[in-house]
Amino acid sequence: MNTTPEVLGRVVATERKPNTPHEFHFWTALDSPVGIGTIVRVESERPVGGVLPQIYGVVTEGFGYTDLQTPLHDVLGSDGVPGASAIAPTERTEIRLYTAAVLRHVPEEPLQPVPMGTVHLATELDVQVALRMDSYVQGAATRGIPVGLYRAGGTQAAVHLDADFLLGPEAAHLSISGVSGLATKTSAVEWLLQSIFTHFPEEKGGVAAVCFNVKGPDLCFLDQPAVQLDDADRAIYDALKVPAEPFKDVHYFAPWTGRGTQLATLRSHEDLQENVQPLTWGLRETLQYAEVLLNKDDVDAKADALIDFIKERVLDQVFSEPRFEMSIEVRTFSDLEKWFSTVLRAMESANQDVWRTHHIATIRKVRNRLSNISTRCKGLVTDDGTVSDLPFGEFRDRHVYVVDVANLEEDAQDLVFARVVSQLREHLEKRQLGVSQVVVFVDELNKYAPADGPDTYVRKMLLDIAERGRYLGLVLFGAQQFRSQVHRRVVGNSGTALFGRMDPDELATPGYQTLAPATKARLATLEKGQLMVRHPHFGQPIFVRFPRPAVMGGRDGVTRYPPAAELPLDAAVTVALRRLDPSISLSWVQDTLALAGDHEDEILRARNRTLQAKPDDVKAFFRAQLKKRVSAEPAARRPAPSLRPAPDDDPYG
Amino acid sequence: MGGGAPLEVRHDDAPPRLETATPLEGDAIRPRPVPGNPTVGFVAFLDGIQRSHVRAHVGTLPIVHGAVAAAIRERVSRRMRTWGTPRRSHALYLPFPALPPEFLSSLAVHCELVDTLADHDGAAPTPQHPGDLAARALTAIQRRREREERHLAEAWVTSASAPLLMDGGIASTELVARSEHVVGAVKSHRTIYVTGESLPVIVGLREGERTTAVVLTSPRRTPVATFYLRLREPGARGPFFGLVRVEVAHRDAEAITERADLVSRWLLAERTPVALPDTRWDVMVYGIRECEDYLSAILT
């Protein structure tokens, strides 16, 4: 065991403040480098079973006092003049007394109250032993994931999480809490993902991350280098053996805007479009999770039964009803609307109130609710069934998939979240995702899995992931401002918890009762770049520093890559098709659209189908999708609106 | 061995008395305002403590355990630290002549033994009363404490050249009594060194005033100069509130005024921090109290 000759303090115990197996007290010199969160080692002077016990602890509370019995004595001694005490020839006897929570006893048995002994600052090796990291960061089969750097009194030590307890199967999930505005939560997750991608053992399989960007440009520039990364940050990267580089492989998915001309994401600068794809779903994908969008109070069991009927008997097949002389293939919302119209018209013609046990009122209600989904989720859900989805089944190792839902309505966000996570789960269950572990990062978790409120589909799904995801390799990284507002079973199942600067009101809630007042005070004033870490191997929470993420922050990103203005239809189509065929020019698109004379929806549908099909001959395919077939001779060209002052090398020109 | 109450609380001091002393500044005892502002002068403080308990009785004879300690606490950058090595001793104090030799031999294996009748006149009858024997033991313990204090004071005088304030008188050893680097502060006033007509001068001293210095002479002690100094305004708290008697070396009668004023300014500077919660806080300087606390901590 490592020993430090310099004695930092001495253990003390009194009847009023006795030592226990889990807590002890020690005093130090007034100028000792001990503070809240410092890890110390106690060397006992009395052998137990022939072994001198060593106890590791982390400082959780500090006291300082003098031999004054009451402040009044100081007032008397200074004649009521505060400045007089400062010129007294002698400073009063003063003590620095600290309370430390035990991290580990060596040997572990017998577990006894902490004995008297000398107290030493923990060395790097001590930190490993104290946090039980020696079982997973030493030797050949290491599975340590660096989470940060512990620093105190000149000691610097890497703090590792156990991959088996962060990403499963032993434990899993991570919860990060902290006040908004410091970017600590997002930064910490970005840093930790980089660390995971660097250190996750290859023999454990592939690991990918799916990040939901729920607000602003937070996660929009993960593949771009950081603007601000100073020497101190680089030193931490070096110490923790993580390259200070942005993510190499990131794929972005975003729905279309309401107009449908461009993707609803702040990553819309034309230089960054190579890895941005639309996220659109049709009827089949949406109906599967209709429960997410339908209000339980509104849609009762009868409506549920009809929806189930549609899913099983109508969707993606030719539905025939000889009595009504109908035969409809329902693949899109438009098809479904036709189906409803036909059924209702037939029932009215036949003067029937009930069809196949479904009452006409129920049918009307379900028609109403389902029909407006494509309106409520415009841009995400398409009438025509065009699907552009995450590559389920083809996920790649160490890749990040960002789903940008920041510009979607709340309902649509829920739908995206429910479907993506459910798909991940289904594919992981079948071991067909493409990677063995996937980290799902959800910000504002209190919104999706609130402690109070209705038992929504999304919350039930999150509870299920929290409780069973670790067996599948489906790992939830949830961030929230107030941990107390997240469902207990979700945070309770998070094997690892990170805390940035906390709101004092939040710290007053019951979930933080186990923390000492000084620890809470430190949490309330944590600097940016500091975290308190709870992990199954650590006997007590530990404070660490982590570097700024090596990726471009959202604010820097939108400054350097300003979002593109929403383009006119022809220009938007040009931009989209040029990703498949760079030779396509604005004038060609304008000519083509002028000849077709289609409605705007039809043009967008043609674009979407082209993007989905990725044909070899983009021009021909796109023309073919237009409703009115374009003839060989171009029509008279209408004047096109100028996108911007056209340079000589206008890419659309 | 059993326990017992500390003997110190049962011990009666010598009866209060007045003693005549020769003035060194003029021919009468007068109040003298201390000129100038309080000045920090002392760099160290010496004190000793003792603890005594009757641990057992052999027949009617008390066996007293005595523990004494003394230390000098040096002030460096306004913080106190121990100077040199503190003196500590534990011993059993008992009347050797009244106890069987084999009993003494068996005790001596475990602990230092001190004969409380060592200075008893062999011709006189051996004291028998347990109270008398306990009082003799206490006297022996006090002497042991004084010896330890003396030892440290001499060490200071020998090796240091800065002012030391010791709790009590300085006259017990010539080396110390003649040193310009040692000042004694006596807090109790069982013996007052004035004649009756001068007593109102002492009682009437105001804060920051001292009396005329006098010389104390004794057949067995080195002459020293002494004067009374009022550290704090007594108000209605009694005539001795804040009153200390200061002892300094009697070296140069011509310079005593300057010396007494300087030492008075040093002592007045030591009024802060106040030595509360000690009950003698009005006459005890913080450095002495801190020294006592230190000794209490090490005398286990």
Image: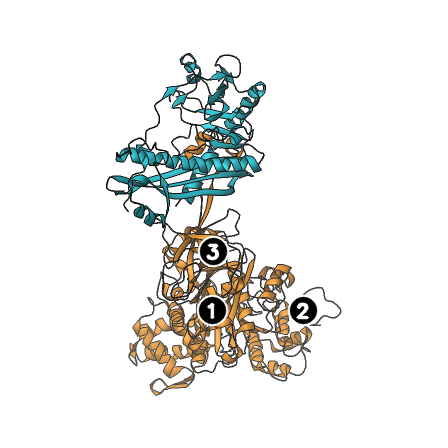
Q: Amino acid at mark 3?
A: Val
Residue at mark 3: A119
In the figure, residue B114 lies in which quadrant? top left
**Relative to A248, is B150 above or below?**
above
Q: Residue at x 38, y 31 (%)?
A: B279
Q: Which chain is cyan?
A: B
Circle 3 SS class = strand
Q: Chain A hue?
A: orange
Residue A550 in view here: no
Foreground: A343 or A6?
A: A6
User: Which residue position is annotated with label 1?
Assistant: A377
Most extreme residue toward the front, as rendered? B123
Q: Is residue A634 visible?
A: yes
Percent x, y for residue B140?
37, 36
Q: Secondary structure at mark 1?
A: loop
Report crowding for label 2: few under 14, some 14 to 19, many 20 or more residues within 10 A (C-alpha): few
User: Residue A640: which numbered mark, if any?
Assistant: 2
Q: Are marks 3 and 1 on the same chain?
A: yes
Name which residue type carries label 2: Ala
Q: Which callout, 1 or 2, points at the residue further toward the start of the chain?
A: 1
State which chain disc 2 sits on. Answer: A
Q: Residue at x 39, y 74 (%)?
A: A468
Nearer to the camera, B177 or A632:
B177
Q: Looking at the picture, which amino acid does disc 1 mark?
A: Cys
Chain containing the residue with disc 1: A
Q: Residues within 10 Å of mark 3 (few under 14, many from 20)?
A: many
- What crowding class fits label 1: few (fewer than 14 Cα within 10 Å), some (14-19), or many (20 or more)? many
Tell me how far mark 1 sits from mark 2, CA to CA.
31 Å
Image coords of residue B232 (percent x, y):
45, 24
Check whether the beta carbons of the residues at disc 3 and disc 2 lie within 8 A of each other: no
